[in-house]
């Protein structure tokens, strides 16, 4: 039986869920007209759905002037609850804490975002120092300009890597950001040879990061961990010294979720 033929199917709820899905999966904020066209629903219906979802904080408008919709605080909160229960997060937590204790720098755990155009932090352990990297769980950062994104790209199958690089904008964030696809591909080969990636002030001025891969039980890239801090403290030499430590903990996390060491 088709779900729309079920006596239990509530059409208005189904339509509201489709509105949410369109906003969540869109790379850009969406307005009333765009949503109406994408969903093949009349404007008045979509307007009522949007206002209800806005009142319940599942969606929100950017501003009074820009009335396009983005994900709201309640939806973000629910997403965080789901993330709380991820096996990877639970497995990684003790190792993130140990890495932070040994280095006193901020440590992140990240996954590839749903759109595959960015990386999303799903956990972090903050540095105890006064000057530290500013970030938040749920924050999304670019693939090409971060150590987390680069290490995950480096270990992807070539076909998947090509798909992602074809759809992301290689935007320059600092003078050191790699903005050429050819140069990035060459850089990713070097990253894979080393086993870790460094963001040398490529995403933010005065911030350096190092990341290592996490593999699942089939040897596929499952996520990554990184260590970040101010470039005055994290010199390139320091990061090379830390590489062994972050590789050790990324391997332990991988093993804890079933990786057997075979790529």
Image (tube, helix red, strand yellow):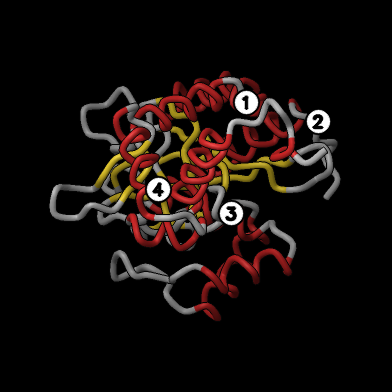
Residue at disc 1, secondary structure: loop
- The quarter of the image holding the N terminus is top right
- Name the disc covering residue 239, or none: none
Mark 3 or 4: in front is: 4
Q: How far apart are marks 1 and 2 (CA)?
A: 15 Å
The mark nearer the N terminus, 3 or 2, is 3
Residue at disc 3, secondary structure: helix
Mark 1 or 3: in front is: 1
Q: Which residue is drawn at 40% across and 48% down?
A: 46
Q: Name the residue under label 3.
A: 151
The mark nearer the N terminus, 1 or 2, is 1
Q: Looking at the rendering, which quadrant does residue 73 occupy?
A: top left
Q: Are marks 3 and 2 in contact (CB under 8 Å)?
A: no
Q: How far apart are marks 3 and 4 (CA)?
A: 41 Å
Q: Name the residue under label 1.
A: 86
Could you classify mark 4 by the number of other residues whose Cα lies within 10 Å: few (under 14), some (14-19), or many (20 or more)? many
The mark nearer the N terminus, 1 or 3, is 1
Q: Looking at the rendering, which quadrant does residue 164 occupy?
A: bottom right
Q: Are marks 4 and 1 in contact (CB under 8 Å)?
A: no
Q: Give x and y (percent) for residue 199.
A: 43, 56
Q: How far apart are marks 4 and 1 (CA)?
A: 33 Å
Q: Do the residues labelled 1 and 3 touch (CB within 8 Å)?
A: no
Q: Mark 4 points at which residue?
A: 46
Residue at disc 4, secondary structure: helix
Q: Mark 2 points at which residue?
A: 258
Q: Give x and y (percent) for residue 158.
A: 72, 68
Q: Which residue is drawn at 29% across and 71% down?
A: 175
């Amino acid at each position: 039986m088709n779900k729309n033929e079920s006596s239990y199917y509530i059409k208005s709820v189904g339509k509201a869920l489709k509105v949410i899905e369109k906003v969540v999966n869109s790379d850009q904020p969406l307005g009333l007209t765009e949503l109406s066209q994408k969903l093949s629903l009349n404007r008045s219906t979509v307007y009522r759905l949007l206002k209800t979802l806005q009142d319940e904080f599942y969606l929100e408008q950017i501003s009074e002037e820009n009335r396009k919709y983005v994900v709201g605080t309640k939806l973000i909160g629910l997403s965080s609850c789901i993330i709380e229960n991820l096996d990877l997060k639970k497995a990684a937590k003790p190792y993130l804490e140990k890495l932070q204790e040994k280095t006193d720098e901020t440590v992140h755990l990240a996954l590839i975002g749903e759109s595959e155009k960015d990386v999303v932090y799903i956990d972090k352990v903050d540095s105890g120092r006064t000057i530290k990297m500013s970030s938040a769980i749920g924050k999304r950062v670019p693939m090409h300009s971060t150590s987390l994104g680069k290490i995950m790209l480096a270990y992807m199958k070539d076909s998947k890597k090509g798909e992602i690089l074809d759809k992301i904008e290689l935007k320059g964030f600092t003078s050191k950001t790699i903005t050429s696809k050819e140069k990035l591909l060459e850089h990713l080969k070097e990253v894979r040879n080393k086993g870790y990636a460094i963001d040398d002030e490529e995403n933010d001025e005065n911030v350096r990061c190092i990341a290592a891969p996490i593999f699942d039980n089939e040897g596929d890239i499952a996520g990554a961990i990184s260590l970040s801090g101010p470039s005055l403290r994290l010199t390139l030499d320091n990061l090379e010294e830390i590489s062994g430590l972050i590789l050790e903990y990324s391997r332990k996390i991988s093993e804890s979720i079933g990786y057997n060491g075979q790529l």
